């Protein structure tokens, strides 16, 4: 089954507090390990930016579950493509600490110093996540 990478952006719902975030990461890590999915989840208080990679069918199944999750809305796909190798294979779902989303990083990949992931191209989002992973310890 082809390896695929999906990157999407979404908006946290009002109910998505710290406890909800912890639960999302916990279930993601359990499910993703089972399904050989890997990736990263970055967010601030307003937006999520997530990358999921793995077998195409498994990526699609996870995305369909994620799409109907009430803890976020306005889900927009930034990139969906076949890949030859994983870029985030060290994490079943690595969480990017908010403090990594610096003004300098946002300016490198977008026209704003704020984290506005809806304004990223798919390629910018991918490159931003690739840069972020360099500071992240393996799981
Ligand atoms: C921003 C966000 C990211 C998520 N990421 C994943 C993920 O990577 N893998 C996963 O299995 N579930 C993820 N979830 C949780 C799913 O939406 C869903 O709650 C979970 O897969 C359990 O689905 P089920 O209740 O149908 O079994 C995420 C949810 C949100 C809001």
Image (cartoon, rainbow, N blue to C red):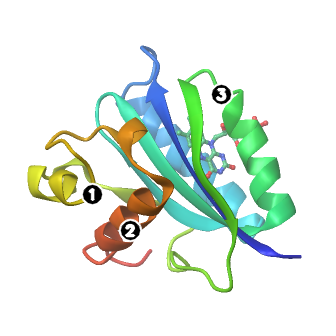
Instruction: Give whichever of 98, 116 is nearer the camera.
Output: 116
Label ID, residue 127: 2
The residue that label 3 is drawn on is: 69
- What residue is rendered at 50% in x and 79% in y? 90
**Label 1, ligand 1: CB separation under 8 Å:** no
Which of the two discs, 1 and 3, labels the residue nearer the N terminus?
3
**Label 3, ligand 1: CB separation under 8 Å:** yes
- Left or right of 64, for residue 121: left
In the rendered image, which quarter contains the N terminus? bottom right
The residue that label 1 is drawn on is: 109
Q: Give me the C-alpha separation between circle 2 and circle 1.
A: 8 Å
Pointer 2 with pointer 1, Cβ within 8 A: yes
- Left or right of 93, for residue 124: left
Q: Give me the C-alpha separation between circle 3 and circle 2.
A: 26 Å
Secondary structure at numbered mark 3: loop
* Res. 93 visible in picture: no
Which of the two discs, 2 and 1, labels the residue nearer the N terminus?
1
């Amino acid at each position: 089954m082809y390896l695929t990478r999906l990157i999407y952006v979404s908006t946290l719902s009002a109910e998505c507090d710290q406890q909800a975030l912890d639960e999302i990461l916990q279930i993601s890590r359990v499910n993703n390990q089972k399904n050989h999915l890997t990736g990263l989840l970055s967010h601030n208080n307003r937006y999520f930016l997530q990358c999921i990679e793995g077998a195409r069918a498994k990526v699609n199944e996870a995305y369909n579950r994620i799409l109907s999750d009430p803890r976020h809305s306005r889900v927009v796909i930034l990139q969906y493509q076949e890949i030859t190798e994983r870029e985030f294979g060290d994490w079943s779902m690595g969480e990017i600490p908010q403090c990594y989303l610096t003004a300098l990083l946002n300016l490198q990949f977008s026209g704003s110093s704020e984290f506005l992931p809806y304004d990223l191209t798919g390629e910018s989002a991918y490159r931003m996540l690739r840069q972020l992973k360099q500071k992240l310890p393996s799981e």
